[in-house]
Amino acid sequence: MSRHEAKLPDGFEDPVFAEPWQAEAFAMTVALHDKGLFSWSEWADALSGEVKKPDAASDGHDYYEHWLVALEKLLSAKGVAGKGEVDALAAAWERAAHATPHGKPILLENDPGLGR
Amino acid sequence: MSHDHDHDNELDPFAARVRALETILTQKGLIDPAAIDVIVDTYETKVGPRNGARVVARAWSDPAYADWLKRDATAAIASLGYTGRQGEHMQAVFNTEETHNLVVCTLCSCYPWSVLGLPPVWYKAPPYRSRAVIDPRGVLEEFGLTLPKDKKIRVWDSTTELRYLVVPMRPKGTEGWSEEQLADLVSRDAMIGTALAKQPE
């Protein structure tokens, strides 16, 4: 085999989710489908569009990053959550996390930029 | 708040975006955070390849069940309490002396969640998705599975509507075993087709 990136990845027994946000992104998608917001083939088309991009890592470690992008695009297309709205709220969450002392739950109310 | 941030929390950008989506979707009444936790718990701890192994063990033990599984896998699997939540249909593909079966999803990562849980990382990664179809024999060798040259390999490409479960061949020397004992011989990879059933010790 000539192409190094065509090797199969190691880590056959990796846990299902590497980080909690991956599990949450997965579960939100399942819940929104249960709610009837989109059909599963709509979802598969959205996900396929992302994971088939040439920059997808051959070891699959970025799979849930593509998953999240696919979910955001689908929600934007459905008029549920626009990119600007998600960007702003994500920034607020990052500020809130930064302003929350270690060991305390991160709450959006902790965002020092809130109400400005 | 002081400027001493040494012990503060940080959210990485992906985690922050997920929180943002959760906030918006919860406010709109589209998701319930408690239900999200239940889904995560289900897929992390309750649904997994043990389900599929029980299906295979039943098929090995009960010819009438095996026949049903061949004809209508969706119903035969549901009868053991395993049903898919995306409305997908199941097809069971049986390994024989002549043919070995291998499952892939070239589209994205369609996988029989209800019987195998969530797919392993390699199943979702581009090399497996592209190469399983082009060079199945080579892929199997990388998994440590070398099949006789005259054995045919049939590759099944999953879709959102139809997902496959490989029923491996029952190992010799397991006559009279209980379904529970037999299920222990059936690994996740054996039901994807990248391994065989384990041999009895």
Image (cartoon, coloured by chain):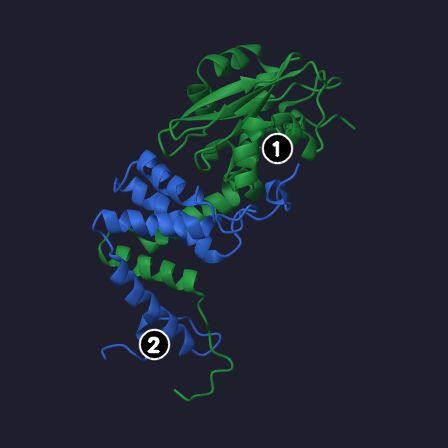
For disc 1, the neighbor class at 10 Å (few under 14, some 14 to 19, many from 20) is some
Q: Which residue has dot 2 on it? A: A110
| Badge 2 density bin: few <14, some 14–19, many ≥20, Cα 10 Å | some
User: Of the numbered discs in the image, which one, if any, rests on residue B189?
Assistant: 1
Q: Quadrant of the N terminus of chain B?
A: bottom left
Give the residue drawn at x 35%, y 46%: A29
- Asked if both marks, 2 and 1, belong to the same chain, the answer given is no
Q: Secondary structure at mark 1?
A: helix
In the image, residue B120 sits, relative to residue B105, either above or below, namely: below
State the SS at label 2. helix
Residue B50, position as x, y percentages in the image? 57, 34
Task: Look at 46% across and 44% down and name the residue there.
Answer: B42
Q: Residue at 67% across / 26% down in the picture? A: B196
**Vertical placement of B51 versus A94: above or below?**
above
Real-space CA distance between mark 2 and mark 1, rounded to the nearest whole angstrom: 46 Å
For badge 2, the amino acid type reads Asn
Q: Which chain is blue?
A: A
Q: Amino acid at mark 1?
A: Asp
